[in-house]
Amino acid sequence: MEQLIDRLKSKEASEKNLTVLLIVGMGGMGKTTLAQAAYNDEKVQSHFKLKAWICVSETYDAFRISKGLLQAFKSFDLKDDKNLDQLQVKLKESLKGERFLIVLDDMWNENYNQWKDLWNIFVQGGIGSKIIVTTRNERVALMMRAEQISMDTLSIDDSWSLLERHAFENMDPREHPELEEVAKKIAAKCKGLPLALKTLANYPFRKEQVIHLWIANGLVVPQGEERIQDLGDQFFNQLRSRSLFDRVRNPSHGNTEEFLMHDLVNDLAQISSSKLCVRLEECQGSHSRHLSYSMGIGGDFEKLTPLNKFEQLRTLLPIFKDFYRPNLSKRVLHNIIPRLTSLRALSLSHYRIKELPDALFIKLKLLRFLDLSWTKITKLPDSICALYNLETLLLSYCDDLEELPPQMENLTNLRHLEKKNNHVEKLSLK
């Protein structure tokens, strides 16, 4: 990492108008992890005036890339939403004379002309600007003709160290010599590939949350007298036994048990879902049923405005990655969410929301899962009592919640009310 940081800040590179650094390696080698570590370094952050991270992915989309960069630079105008030429003119203006750092993560596109179009925009930046590109495709590296950082496999000692740390957790492997011998053989068979030794992932999730989301979307159908929660638990354990999920502990959430999915497994899941389950930042079209998105710091109104076109949206989940809880624009609560009348699952967790509009839930008749945990709400709107299909309501860590609406006893399908670690633990349905 130090080598990459030195290259980003080197005097020689800073004298050039633009430098591209390529991180090349097979899936799971840690390319993105290395780029993230360098990108988030304090010295690197202070060295560049403009910074942006774009996940390019296999489907190259110049419009999405341009729009994402402008959003990162706080220069996006809704009037430019439909026109690529206008977006790129605006992008040139934003970059002109400014020293920037842009990461293009997971680049697959080998088309030189498309790369040249981007290059002609990037060269407008100030002296010392840098672009980091991560790719599994060596032909991309050849096409760009840029300086390369190759990711090598781990040594046998490093492989064993990594496997030991995660496989034995808090145990001393020397106390289990029979397991240690087997584990060292496994480490050797992994050929130094970090992916095979430890699933690197980006979004931790709780087992119970996933099962509730499955149930809300009708994916768990019990037979006979079998409890639906028990069946969901069986499904989850089957997937985990096939190594699709990796268990971790989250110290920031009271050391609770959480799980991770590697990005390669996530890629496979997205292909299998036929684009019905996507990230909003990567969405093309308005036919997706299940959307997630990264929470921003500006209220997320501009990011969520396209949701007005998603008439069949079933699931909306914000992804929380930082310790800071961002605000959510009141316009989202008043003008966007109430129009998503097909929603089965909605999360507003970790937003700094103090109150919810009275009419928020009136038209969300099909809602079955609602997560308001880790918010600042003081009370729930009466309209929540009209959610007759609601099955799961999460209110944990709502420190300021003072009372539950008296009419909540009308929610006859509500079977899971979670209210951990706050004053609402003492509250009950009257």
Image: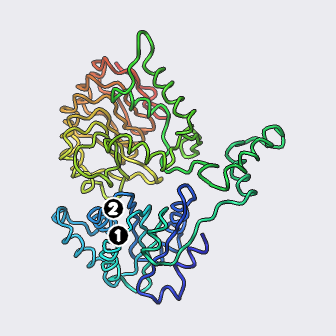
Local secondary structure at mark 1: loop
Residue 167: % across, % down: 69, 43
Residue 150: % across, % down: 58, 69
Q: Which residue is mark 1?
A: 111
Residues at marks 2 and 1 touching, judged by CB atoms closer than 8 Å: yes
Q: Amino acid at mark 1?
A: Asn
Whichever of callouts 2 and 1 sits on the residue coming sooner in the sequence is: 2
Residue occupying the point 78% across, 38% down: 179
Local secondary structure at mark 2: loop
**Total label count?**
2
Give the quarter of the figure containing the C terminus: top left
In the drawing, what numbered circle is on residue 60?
2
Is disc 2 surrounded by few (<14), some (14 to 19) or many (20+) residues within 10 Å?
some
Residue occupying the point 35% across, 30% down: 403
Viewer-nearest residue: 419 or 64: 64
Residue occupying the point 33% across, 69% down: 73
Give the quarter of the figure containing the N terminus: bottom right
Residue occupying the point 31% across, 71% down: 114
